[in-house]
Amino acid sequence: MPGEPGTPLEQVGRLLILGGLVVVALGLLMLLVSRVPAIGRLPGDLSWRGDGWSVYIPLASSLLISIVLSVLLTIILNLLGRR
């Protein structure tokens, strides 16, 4: 029967809700990161400009954000008792 717990339709609905929450969390994270003055202008961030074009590769900023998120995720998972 449609709407029963565990049906594929219910599973897809839960997945869509979870995906939406992840997108909202990423949006909030981007808003917060954009207010940190050093992010985007670290010594390892590469940028080139020319006539009518520019290329920006945030290597150092990406590495720093990755390390911070990895540490936070490790702490959260350890607090929840999962490894």
Image: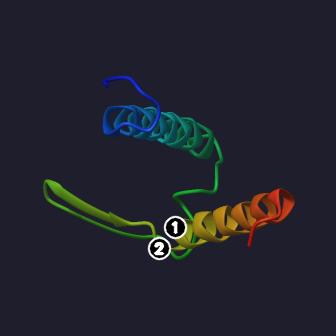
Q: Residues within 10 Å of mark 1 (few under 14, many from 20)?
A: some
- Quadrant (top left/top right/bottom left/bottom right) for the C terminus: bottom right
Q: Residue at x 62, y 69 (%)?
A: 64
* Quadrant of the image occupied by residue 15: top left
Q: Kindly identify the residue that appears in the image at 39 percent across and 32 percent down.
A: 10
- What's the residue type where badge 2 is placed? Leu
> Where residue 65 appears, x then y in whole percent?
60, 63
Residue with the most extreme left position: 52
In the depicted structure, whether residue 38 falls above or below residue 31:
below
* Mark 2 secondary-structure assignment: helix
Residue 59: image tag: 2
Amino acid tagged 1? Ser
Closer to us: 1 or 44: 1
Residue contact at pointers 2 and 1, CB within 8 angstroms: yes
Label 2 crowding class (10 Å Cα cut-off): few <14, some 14-19, many 20+?
Answer: some
Residue holding disc 1? 62
Q: Secondary structure at mark 1?
A: helix
| Residue 32 versus residue 66 in the image, above or below | above
Q: Along the horizontal axis of the image, is 18 left or right of 28?
A: left
